[in-house]
Image (cartoon, grey):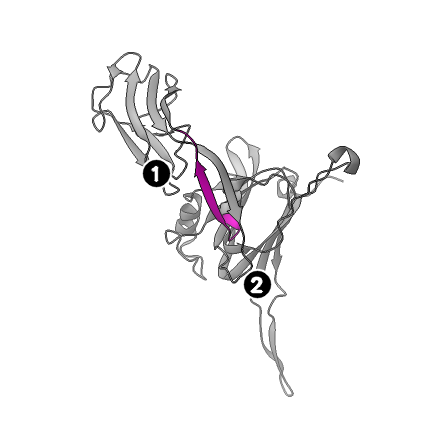
Amino acid sequence: MAATNSKALSVKPWQLYVALLDETVPKLESDWSNAVEHRAALEALNYIRISSITDASVSDNLAANIVKVETDDNGLIYASTEPDATLTGNFFEIEPDVLDKILPTSKISVAWTLVSGATQDVLADAVAYWDFVKIGNQNWDGSALTVNSVTGSVDWALTLTTDYTVEANSDGVYWIKLVSGGTITTLTQVFTINYDYTPNAATMNYLIKEGIEIPRLVVKIKAMYTPTKYKIDYLADCGFEGELIKSYSDINRVGSLTPTPFNFQLNRSGSHLFYDDYNV
């Protein structure tokens, strides 16, 4: 028998993203009057993808924190619930950048040696004015990169501020932006960035057994139905609660990799927003 509404079936694979909650995200009002603004602020955060996930599941528990007042003469006179939401599943890839978001650990970077005159080509028509162009390599400590020059294959040497700017986003990642109105005559040319950077020789993450604060997070899971239509679940103001499992086993003997289960639990006054533009 065919489904009554096949669009309501969760049959597509999901991708999972996580970001730190910040003050740019307004609290979702109880009457949903600011839902559009709330969702736009959530979407503007700097997300990192948690890769290679299985069995992602969002649970809204409407039986959480139920309060009932029953009287002898009138029976039930009041009932309420404070709903809870949880996102669970497993992930296999333990990326350092993901750990920095979800776990209350600290990371130490160790500097390597200076790389001078690294180059990066931005292909013709691959960028518009004012677009962020991420510089491929960053300094080990997140400090400002030294951009020696930006050269166009047509316009040759470009001028800082007049033709391009060097900026960092909120995560400390450095980019350039091409500026309109300067001496750039066309975007149909190859732009070559020449810069210096000092990479990491290594990173160290550590965890100390003491009271530590759990980061306040936003997680979203996204399913694509077409290149432009999708469904998204947002859990705004939640925390990672669970274990980080690193298994050093021979996969040929064991027969499988050992995943890390994840459990993102909604904090009080947090919100679960489900966005569906499939029918737009």
Residue with the mark numbered 1: 143
The x and y percentages for residue 143 are 34, 38
Left or right placement of residue 53 versus residue 144 in this view: right
Left or right placement of residue 96 versus residue 175 in this view: right
Magenta span: 101-113
Disc with the residue nearer the chain's start (1 vs 2): 2
Q: Nearer the viewer, residue 16 or 247?
A: 247
The x and y percentages for residue 110 are 45, 38
Q: What residue is drawn where x is 24% and y is 20%?
A: 158
The disc labelled 1 sits on which kind of residue? Ser
Check disc 2: other Cα within 10 Å, few if <14, some if 14-19, many if 20+: some
The disc labelled 2 sits on which kind of residue? Pro
Hey, which quadrant is residue 250 in on the image?
A: top right
Q: How far apart are labels 1 and 2 at the CA level?
A: 43 Å
**Can residue 170 be seen by looking at this rendering?**
yes
Numbered tag placed on residue 83 in the rendering: 2
